């Protein structure tokens, strides 16, 4: 009976956590459905299907609003579990802290602005002869720009001096790919991190910053 009660409490805690970040887990559920759908597509059709929902130059020039929305509903590579982990570690705490509306605003700003700026840089590279014309139709879907933006804004959730260590690690993760043959996606990720950092005004009035030292002390006590 004790095990049953413990299981119920555990499931209740998980359900409560999910309910506290509805936007995160609804989005994750949509990604699960679309990932299952991708696994049932033939490789050739999958590439054509996803390219039509990609924020590449060709699609952005035709239906920008549509692809900016649909590109955030699919995962390139078809691996859902890593994103379930990352959403729980980054998106859910950000949504619980900022509230669904502010969290969503950070996600949209990072996804849209990073997509447009990185594709604009790619367009310039094509016109300058640095990148091939075929790059205008490249595959560029996924939720990583929004994730990078949330990683950035979470900097303000952590109390100093831990904040600076977190920021240093995040900056290193996103800046390292820029040191060797960076792609437009690498540039987009770094831009999205900066956009998240620029969302500081949205964090005002959201309560005391989290202090890891206080948490460790409470656990030991």
Image: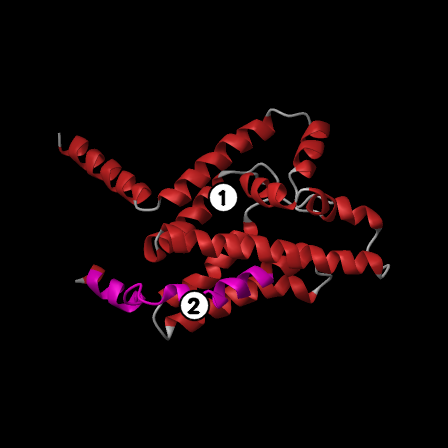
User: Measured from the top left, where is residue 111 in percent x and y?
Assistant: 56, 53
Label disc, if present, on residue 200 of the rendered structure: 2
User: Measured from the top left, where is residue 144 in percent x and y?
Assistant: 55, 50
- Which callout, 2 or 1, points at the residue further toward the start of the chain? 1
User: Measured from the top left, where is residue 217 in percent x and y?
Assistant: 22, 66
In the displayed structure, 174 sits above or below 161; it is above
In the displayed structure, 107 sits above or below 44; it is below
Does the magenta portion include 214?
A: yes
User: Measured from the top left, where is residue 161 in percent x and y?
Assistant: 37, 75
Q: How many marks?
A: 2
Viewer-nearest residue: 102 or 218: 102
Nearer the camera: disc 2 or disc 1: 2
In the displayed structure, 20 sits above or below 158; it is above
- The residue shown at (25%, 67%) is 214
Point out the stretch of residues depicted in magenta.
Answer: 190-218
- The residue shown at (73%, 61%) is 181
Does the magenta portion include 122?
A: no
Label disc, if present, on residue 82 of the rendered structure: 1
Viewer-nearest residue: 202 or 12: 202
Q: Is residue 215 left or right of residue 120?
A: left
Q: Secondary structure at mark 1?
A: helix
* Separation of marks 2 and 1 at Cα, in angstroms: 27 Å
Q: Secondary structure at mark 2?
A: helix
- The residue shown at (83%, 49%) is 133
Structural crowding at the residue carrying mark 1, measured as other residues with C-alpha within 10 Å and reported as few (<14), some (14–19) or many (≥20): few
Magenta stretch prevailing secondary structure? helix
Label disc, if present, on residue 26 of the rendered structure: none
Q: Is residue 179 left or right of residue 220?
A: right
């Amino acid at each position: 009976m004790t095990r049953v009660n413990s299981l119920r409490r555990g499931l209740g805690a998980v359900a409560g956590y999910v309910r506290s970040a509805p936007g995160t887990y609804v989005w994750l559920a949509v990604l699960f459905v679309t990932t299952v759908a991708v696994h049932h597509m033939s490789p050739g059709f999958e590439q054509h299907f996803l390219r039509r929902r990609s924020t590449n130059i060709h699609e952005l020039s035709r239906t920008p609003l549509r692809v900016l929305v649909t590109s955030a509903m699919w995962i390139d590579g078809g691996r859902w579990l890593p994103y379930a982990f990352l959403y729980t570690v980054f998106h859910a705490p950000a949504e619980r802290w900022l509230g669904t509306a502010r969290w969503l605003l950070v996600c949209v700003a990072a996804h849209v602005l990073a997509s447009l700026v990185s594709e604009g840089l790619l367009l310039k590279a094509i016109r300058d002869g640095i990148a091939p014309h075929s790059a205008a139709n490249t595959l560029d879907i996924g939720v990583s720009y929004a994730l990078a933006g949330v990683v950035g804004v979470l900097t303000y959730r952590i109390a100093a001096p831990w904040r600076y260590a977190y920021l240093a690690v995040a900056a290193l993760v996103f800046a390292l790919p820029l040191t060797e043959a960076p792609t437009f996606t690498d540039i987009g990720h770094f831009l999205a991190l900066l956009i998240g950092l620029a969302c500081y005004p949205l964090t005002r009035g959201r309560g005391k910053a989290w202090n890891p030292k206080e948490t460790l002390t409470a656990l030991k006590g």
